[in-house]
């Protein structure tokens, strides 16, 4: 044990580390607090925490003590070597104490390196490593080793909790997105389109403005599925969806409401203009399974063609029926054919 004026029992520092982990904040700040508790108890010259990042190779420095920016950068570069003690501790999942090494100035220091490990379904999962260095001579006693092991466990707990929170947030976001979008095309689903249509109609009613609603149907889609298979059909749907998304304004909403049926909710009276733009974009697509892609469209306007959502949808369906009668790639309104 060092002759420095050390606390009689370094384990008295653990409440501070526990408080850091129990607190709220960014992971880096929490780990800095854990590292600070260890530094206060054991008074090393340097200390650092490295963690593995699923999105980046190697270990990333997230907290340090006694290192300026240049020294931190140098250490981060050195740890990229798999033989470096920080890397070995993480990969081997084993702690190393009282390891002597030379500083850049030639002085000798003694290091301790511990893995950051959590258990998942009975399997130890390494998350990184924590390490400290003291001026030689320095031999850690049992209480100090136990303290460092506890500190490492607390740091691993903080990292694991942060990752679980991130995973939960990502999963929640994914479920939220799936609840509102069509999984094949990424466009709004039928429920979302219906809600947006009601909101736009309510707003237009208050403001005395218009809303355009268009329905699109892929021509001879069943023939494409028969001749090219479901993969070809899915490819057609994704391409149509891409053209729809690229052709509309930021204020418009496009969705897939089932099968090969797509819809557009467009505030104002520009529905016919947008529908023609969509048809032109579809006509420029390359063939799929040897078949040219075309769609037909029916357009209706609130309040001219319908005073509520049901009436507007019915008018758009009538327009779509007229467009189909005119031939592939046609567009018609709910009242009078538009060519």
Image (cartoon, helix red, strand yellow):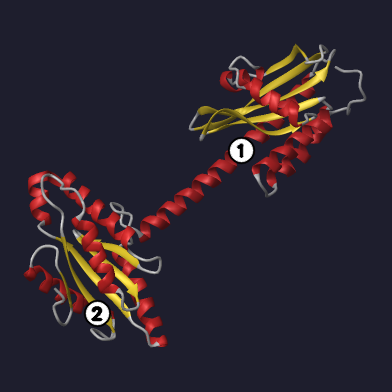
Image coordinates of residue 316 in percent, x first then y, are 20, 75
Kindly report which numbered mark, 1 or 2, lies closer to the viewer in this rendering: 2
Residue 55 in percent (x, y) is at 51, 35
Q: CA distance from mark 1 to mark 2?
A: 53 Å
User: Residue at 53% across / 46% down in the picture?
Assistant: 166
Query: 55 or 273, which lies in front?
Result: 273
Quarter containing the C terminus: bottom left
Task: Residue 177: give x, y in percent of width and height.
Answer: 40, 56
Q: Nearer the viewer, residue 159 or 310?
A: 310
Q: Which mark is residue 159?
A: 1
Q: Which residue, given by chain and number where applicable, does mark 2 sit on?
A: 312
Foreground residue, 19 or 210? 210
Residue at image x 21%, y 48%? 235
At 78% across and 26% down in the image, what residue appears?
46
Please say if 85 is above or below 199: above
- Callout 1 crowding tier (Cα within 10 Å): few <14, some 14–19, many ≥20: many
Q: Of callouts 1 and 2, which one flags the residue occurring earlier in the amino acid sequence?
A: 1
Can you give x and y, in whole percent of width and height, for residue 291 in the image?
A: 11, 49
In the picture provided, is 149 more to the left or to the right than 119? Answer: right
Left or right, residue 81 beside residue 42:
left
What element does badge 1 sit on? helix
Task: Give the quadrant of residue 289.
Answer: top left
Vertical placement of residue 152 versus 33, above or below = above
Q: Is residue 2 left or right of residue 215?
A: right
């Amino acid at each position: 044990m060092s002759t420095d004026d050390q606390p009689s029992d370094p384990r008295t520092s653990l409440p501070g580390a526990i408080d850091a982990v129990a607190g709220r904040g960014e992971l880096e700040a929490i780990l800095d607090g854990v590292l600070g508790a260890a530094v206060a108890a054991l008074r090393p010259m340097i200390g650092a925490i490295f963690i593995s990042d699923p999105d980046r190779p190697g270990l990333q420095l997230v907290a340090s003590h006694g290192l300026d920016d240049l020294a931190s950068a140098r250490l981060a570069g050195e740890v990229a070597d798999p033989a470096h003690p920080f890397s070995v501790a993480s990969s081997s999942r084993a702690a190393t104490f009282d390891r002597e090494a030379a500083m850049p100035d030639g002085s000798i220091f003694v290091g301790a390196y511990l893995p950051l490990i959590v258990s998942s379904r009975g399997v130890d999962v390494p998350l990184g490593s924590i390490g400290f260095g003291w001026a030689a001579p320095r031999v850690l006693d049992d209480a100090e080793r136990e303290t460092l092991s506890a500190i490492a466990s607390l740091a691993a707990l903080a990292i694991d909790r942060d990752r679980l929170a991130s995973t939960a947030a990502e999963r929640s976001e994914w479920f939220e997105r799936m609840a509102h979008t069509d999984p094949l095309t990424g466009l709004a689903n039928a429920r979302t389109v219906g809600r947006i249509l009601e909101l736009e109609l309510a707003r237009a009613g208050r403001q005395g403005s218009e809303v355009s609603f268009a329905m699109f149907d892929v021509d001879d889609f069943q023939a494409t599925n028969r001749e090219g298979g479901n993969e070809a059909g899915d490819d057609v749907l994704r391409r149509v969806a891409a053209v729809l998304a690229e052709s509309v304004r930021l204020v418009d909403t496009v969705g897939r409401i089932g099968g090969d049926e797509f819809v557009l909710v467009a505030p104002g009276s520009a529905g016919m203009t947008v529908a023609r733009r969509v048809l032109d974009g579809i006509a420029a697509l390359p063939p799929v399974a040897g078949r040219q892609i075309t769609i037909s469209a029916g357009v209706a306007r609130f309040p001219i063609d319908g005073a509520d959502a049901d009436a507007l949808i019915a008018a758009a369906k009538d327009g779509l029926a007229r467009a189909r009668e005119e031939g592939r790639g046609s567009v018609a309104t709910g009242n009078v054919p538009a060519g």
